[in-house]
Amino acid sequence: MPRLDQILELLQATPQDTFLRYALAMEYRSLGQTGTAAEQFNQLLAAQPPHVPSFFMYGQMLAEQGETEAARGILRDGIEQARAQGDAHAAGEMSELLADLGSLGE
């Protein structure tokens, strides 16, 4: 059974499972279905509390698509959330990516 089908089947049983929702977003991203991946990332960002790793991966995906300004916004929000949740490591990773995007001069 393809991984996507497995994740979808598991999510039917536990639709609020953050890890599975994140796995689904990442699987859609890897399949090139970035619009569907974005929908899943947005659900994770809207969760309470927001899923911090999703900010980084969503920002990275947007940057890869040339959506630099959108990526910067997601990363800034992610840094704020990471700090609020006490995740200095994630805040640092997102800060580095944000700085890299700034160096593109766009």
Image (cartoon, rainbow, N blue to C red):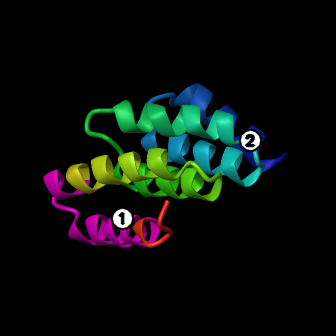
Q: Which mark is residue 33?
A: 2
Taking the image as shown, residue 73 lies to the left or right of residue 3, namely: left
Foreground of the two, 8 or 89: 89
Q: Does the magenta stretch mainly form a helix, a strand or a loop?
A: helix
Asked if the stretch drawn in magenta spans residue 67, the answer is no
Q: Amino acid at mark 1?
A: Met
- How far is disc 2 from disc 1 in space, using C-alphas? 23 Å
Disc 2 is placed on an element classified as loop
Q: Which mark is residue 1?
A: none
Q: What x and y, as percent, mark residue 11?
A: 58, 32
Taking the image as shown, residue 81 lies to the left or right of residue 1, namely: left
Q: Which mark is residue 94?
A: 1
Q: What x and y, as percent, mark residue 37?
A: 62, 40
Question: Which region shows up in magenta?
Answer: 82-101
Residue at the extreme right of the image, as rendered? 1
Examine the rendered structure and indicate whether residue 83 appears above or below residue 51.
below
Examine the rendered structure and indicate whether residue 65 appears above or below residue 21.
below
Question: Which residue does the image show at 62% across and 36% down from the upper left?
Answer: 10
